[in-house]
Image: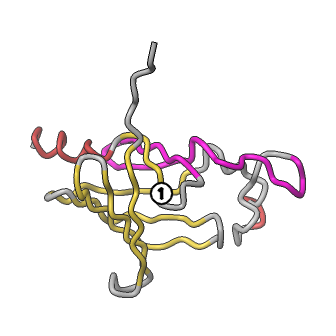
Amino acid sequence: MIGETEEGDKLIGVWEPSNKKIYLKIDKISGKYYGKIVWLREPIDPVTGKPKTDKNNPDESLKDVPLKGFRMLKDFVYKGDGEWADGTIYDPQNGSTYNCVIKLRDDNTLDIRGYIGLKTFGRTDVWKRLVNKKKKK
């Protein structure tokens, strides 16, 4: 069981989706994996001049929640063989939540498959791990 925990924890870290608009930090909380936005390329809403919020959320009470710190990935469980499932991914661009499976392609690459109903009716995005680079002296 310890080996499985260590394997599952390979998901922990900071990741960048292919659109390069955000960084998402994935952590483990009470045995499940969650991801929140920790950086936005454009953090300020050009219309309001204030930090971007979840303005596309269908729940009116959540439209003013800041995107930075927003939890996009929820409730993922490690299933073995480099796969996490049983979770959801939220897309702040359209305010929709999708079922999701995460597959570790290699130590620094994830395949994120969001879908409705069947996995065949979805879309896969490739996320890259942000790796600390040593500063030049």
Q: Residue at x 43, y 41 (%)?
A: 14
The number of callouts visible is 1
Q: Residue at x 70, y 72 (%)?
A: 58
- Residue that lies at the very extreme toward the right in this rendered image: 48
Dominant SS in magenta: strand
What's under tag 1, amino acid-wise?
Answer: Pro
Give the magenta-colored segment's residue range: 22-49
Identify the element where label 1 is drawn: loop
Quadrant location of the C terminus? top left
- Residue that lies at the very extreme toward the front in this rendered image: 137
Q: Is residue 4 left or right of residue 76?
A: left
Q: Residue at x 65, y 45 (%)?
A: 68
Q: Residue at x 29, y 56 (%)?
A: 77
- Residue that lies at the very extreme toward the top in this rendered image: 137
Q: Position of residue 32 (x, y in %)?
A: 34, 49
Q: Is residue 103 magenta?
A: no
Quadrant location of the N terminus? top left
Label 1 crowding class (10 Å Cα cut-off): few <14, some 14-19, many 20+? some
Q: Is residue 136 left or right of residue 22?
A: left
Q: Position of residue 60 (x, y in %)?
A: 78, 66
Q: Position of residue 34 (x, y in %)?
A: 43, 49
Q: Position of residue 106 (x, y in %)?
A: 22, 52
Q: Is residue 15 left or right of residue 76?
A: right
Between 107 and 81, the one lying in front of the other is: 107
**Residue under circle 1?**
17
